[in-house]
Amino acid sequence: MRETQLVLDNWKFKACQEKEWMEAAVPGCVHTDLLRNGIIKDPFYATNEHDLQWIDKIDWEYETQFDVAGELLQASALELVFDGLDTYADVYLNGQHVLSADNMFRTWKADVKSIVTAANNHLRIKFRSPVQEDLPKIDKLGYNLPASNDQSELGGLGAQKISIFARKAPYHYGWDWGPRFVTSGIWREARLVGWSESRIVDVHVLQDSVTAAQASLSVSVEIESEESWSGTVKISADGQVWEQEAALEQGSSIVEVKAVIEQPKLWWSRGLGEAHRYTFTAELVKEEKAVAAKSVRTGLRSVRLVRDKDEKGASFYFELNGVPVFAKGANHIPNDSFITDVTDERYRHEIAAAAESNMNMLRVWGGGIYEQSVFYELCDEYGIMVWQDFMFACSMYPGDEAFLENVRLEAIENVKRLRNHPSIVLWCGNNEIDSAWAEYDEDGGWGWKKEYTKEQRKVIWSDYEAVFHDILPEAVAAFAPGTQYWPSSPLISLTGDINQHAHPLSAEGDIHYWGVWHAVEPFENYNVKVGRFMSEYGFQSFPEYDTVMTFATEQDLALDSKVMRAHQKNGDGNRLIKEYMDIYMNQPKDFPAFLYMSQVLQAEAMKMAIEAHRRNMPYCMGTLYWQMNDCWPVASWAGMDYYGKWKAMQYYAKRSFADTMLSFDRTDDGLVNVHLVTDLLTPIKGELSLRLYDFAGALIKETSALVSMDGNHAAVVSSINEQEWLYGYEAGSVVLYAELVQNGLLTDNKTYYFAKAKDQKLTDSVISITEVEGSNGTAFTFAADALAKQVWVTAEHEGKFSDNFFDLIPGVAKTVQFTHRNEGEAAGKPTAAGKVQARSMIDFLARNETV
Ligand code: BMA
């Protein structure tokens, strides 16, 4: 009998102390069920978060009833399977305790063959409060462990940080962009699974060697059998078949089948080629009949993290199918505080946005979850490489035997679950713990060590080493051999001395550069603090007005209002945005204008950082900004807000990540350099034009030249002398425009300003909007009669434009396309935008300011 299953639904839930049952949605959690039943108000609205902290202090229970019919009832093995229980759960079937769970990242199973009956099976799950469960562990340990982002105070727990005890998404306890909602519930599918004789539990396509000529694979098929038997294990893919005779023992066995594909279609990251995927199907054949089957999808590629010593330090880059790839992308956090609210469409919206923004990598950051399978499937499909953290961030963890064993099983299960995804190119132990603790640098790190005695420090560090230097790498080596493991991000390398811990000027390893923002360094430092691989850096902004209005009223629209403060989780955040805005920009005329300007400020900062990193290729080979997305509507470092709306920065990132890009910088002796950067492998040959315009659109000076450059390369292709070009003109009234044309087609263009934004003499400008003929309201051309900066185009319908927040030079028009955001057929296709509006910086400035 083939494996059959019954997905368990029709759940009810209640607080253990209450009598009344209410309807529940599974997968889901207590918070979303309470909201659906009208018991609580929208957790994201105003300051509601503060009033909902009681939920995690009490126990909750879920129950359902189910009948089992036909084949499933006949199955000789019956198993209850939970893909995710959050977190401390006791499960009872027909009154019998069948399992207890204590890790939301693991799968929980129980043999229930002897308990299940044909009708009215009663399944009950009790979720013990994670707070009550873990509070006593602090006393037992004798001290608090550091957990910088755990908002224990908001949760009514004072300084008691309990997040470190639970193998539960760290961000549930709050973060510097996220609310504190410590959920409980059945967060992934629950089902009854039946099988008889034999079944295939897992198929792993191990890629022993992959080149353009040949892929040599070892396909491991994990089989569970009730009795011993012999037969054939058959693998098929793309019309080819490989077979292996097998004599199976009773119980669990692994059969390995060797497979070779000549001239395979390789899996490439976006920009370098097709992200081709193969489906491999494994079958167990007994007496010429297939008795069990399972298919997996994977892509064939070779990937290597290259850390070769060089004259400056050591390289840090990913080599995909033999090609050094410059990694462009962002850090991903969970898309919602209530992860089961994230539909597949929302995942697609995010990954499609990454691809559209010319990214090729996302980092699944360690304070969230090992993502849902759909996330990785989309990354496979769009050619987005994944830097995968294990779920540990900004904290020290306990190291008792039970905890370590729990972590070991969690690591094995997740590595096994995700190992066929070609997108995953690296597993990383944790986020920022090596540098925060800084074991070998007495005065380094975040000051954590000082809180502990010598003996305590010894224990804490050896517990750290057990997890991140032993258990996790062992799980990767054993279950995804050949996959790179990196102990902590950032890190120089595992030297066991002071040279281990990363700092913003390390010439080896990866870097989180937070000098701009947390340490209030000037944006210009992005040009200087460039490492081999920039895995984090960022700058905050506010979401747009419409998003703010989903949680605030007109009365709340002030930076220091209670509501706006509740939607800013970084203590210094609002002050920092103000401070940097005062330095770099003019005064906004009102609060909505402030929101717009905060986005432009962030976008300009990120453009500087990204382009500096790319100009420094191949010294620097990766740039992942903090952060891609939001988990609720909030002021944060995200480029896309909670509703998936692109902030100014997302459009800027799209331009600065363009596979072939022009970029300017200025040397101290007054040269303005035009850099050309390309990630494409084909050489560049084209005409580079430079034009100097005044803000009214008069062409002052022009030059053009043929330029050529190798593929996968960065170089200065032109330099101009600022003084010469500006002679007789005011720096604040002119703009330099560069354009690269290849074979008659525009490859890229960029503008450069000689004066800081504050000193630019903007004037009123009328922006004309013309619908492109025949586009049915989906494409528009914009033109301005005086220079218009950061033109923000909005549409009546929900969706986005192919470009936005761009500068318009009079005479240099711009055409953009509108795509509607909706599910199904029309998704991502051009549709009518409805009424279109265009505003630019001048419209948001306080009029009494220098404009
Ligand atoms: C980095 C991240 C997060 C944090 C962000 C902004 O350190 O790893 O912990 O949200 O900075 O402070």
Image (cartoon, grey):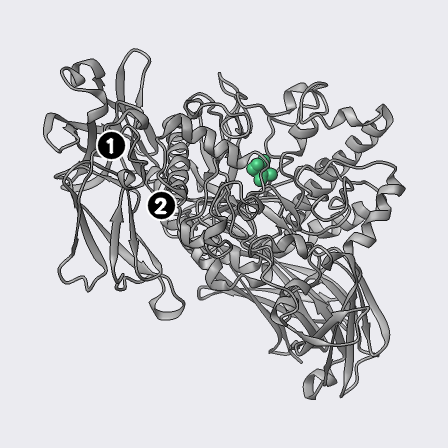
Q: Amino acid at mark 2?
A: Gly
Secondary structure of the residue carrying tag 1 is strand
**Above-or-below relation of 699 to 426:** above
Query: Picture coordinates of residue 397 (x, y %)?
Result: 76, 40
**Above-or-below relation of 265 to 319:** below
Real-space Cα distance between discs 2 and 1? 24 Å
**Above-or-below relation of 280 to 781:** below
Camera-nearest residue between 226 and 334 = 334
Report the number of discs.
Answer: 2
Q: Amino acid at mark 1?
A: Thr
Label 1 residue near ligand 1, CB within 8 Å = no
Camera-nearest residue between 838 and 513 = 838
* Residue position marked by numbered label 1 in the rendering: 751
Q: Residue 604: which quarter of the image?
A: top left
Ligand 1 quarter of the rendering: top right
Q: Is residue 848 left or right of residue 594?
A: left
Query: Picture coordinates of residue 666 (x, y %)?
Result: 31, 19
- Please state, as top left, top right, bottom left or bottom right, where the C terminus lies in the image: top left
- Disc on res. 271: 2
Query: Picture coordinates of residue 114 (x, y %)?
Result: 84, 79
**Above-or-below relation of 429 to 829:** above
Camera-nearest residue between 362 and 144 = 144
